[in-house]
């Protein structure tokens, strides 16, 4: 069952000048990552130039979906963030931090299959019939 449309206020909050408001919007909008218009907003938040806390919060919320839609957006942002390194932006580091925090939340705690589930999703994306999606994930895996 599809979730109802996101509240307009949450969509508006994604453009707030306040970083914490944008971070909260990214976390909330992750529930609609499968909708193209919301995916575009999430992609922008994953590459937020105003505050990297927005990047990490949005990335973690998308990964917690544990589905192809969230993982695809993170893979796409990671590929783009790699290109941002050339102009001195460290978004790739913050996306990496969110992935590590998702996969290893305790660092020393017991892993319950999160890593295996994530690898299955990555494999599914790599086998995706859309060549752009497969190429994005392949580029992400090489980083």
Image (cartoon, rainbow, N blue to C red):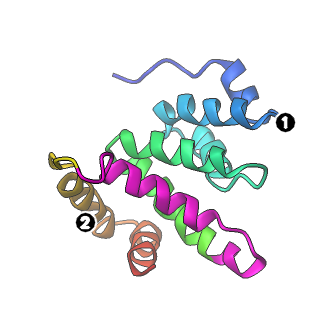
> In this rendering, would 71 be left or right of 42?
left
Q: Looking at the picture, tell me which residue is in the foreground, 11 or 58.
A: 58
The reply to whether dot 1 and dot 2 touch (C-beta < 8 Å) is: no
Q: Residue at x 53, y 59 (%)?
A: 95
Q: Main secondary structure of the magenta part?
A: helix
**Residue occupied by mark 2:** 123
Residue 98 included in the magenta stretch of the image: yes
Crowding around mark 1 (Cα neighbors within 10 Å: few <14, some 14 to 19, many 20+) is: few
Quadrant showing the N terminus: top left
Q: Residue at x 50, y 36 (%)?
A: 30
Q: Which residues are magenta?
A: 83-108
Residue 31 in the image: state x and y as whole percent: 46, 31
Distance, label 1 to label 2, CA atoms, is: 37 Å
Helix, strand or loop under label 1? loop
Q: Residue at x 47, y 52 (%)?
A: 98
Residue 40 in the image: state x and y as whole percent: 63, 47
Helix, strand or loop under label 2? helix
**Residue occupied by mark 1:** 17
Residue with the most extreme right position:
17
Residue 101 in the image: state x and y as whole percent: 40, 50
């Amino acid at each position: 069952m599809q979730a109802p449309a996101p509240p307009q206020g949450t969509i508006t909050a994604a453009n707030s000048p306040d970083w914490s408001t944008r971070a909260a919007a990214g976390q909330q909008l992750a529930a609609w990552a499968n909708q193209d218009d919301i995916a575009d907003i999430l992609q922008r938040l994953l590459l937020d130039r105003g505050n990297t806390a927005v990047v990490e919060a949005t990335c973690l919320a998308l990964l917690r979906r544990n589905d192809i839609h969230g993982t695809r957006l993170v893979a796409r942002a990671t590929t783009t963030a790699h290109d941002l390194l050339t102009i001195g932006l460290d978004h790739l580091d913050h996306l990496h931090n969110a992935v590590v925090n998702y996969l290893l939340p305790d660092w020393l705690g017991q892993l319950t299959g999160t890593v295996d589930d994530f690898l299955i999703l990555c494999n599914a994306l790599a086998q995706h019939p859309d060549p752009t999606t497969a190429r994005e994930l392949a580029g992400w895996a090489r980083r």
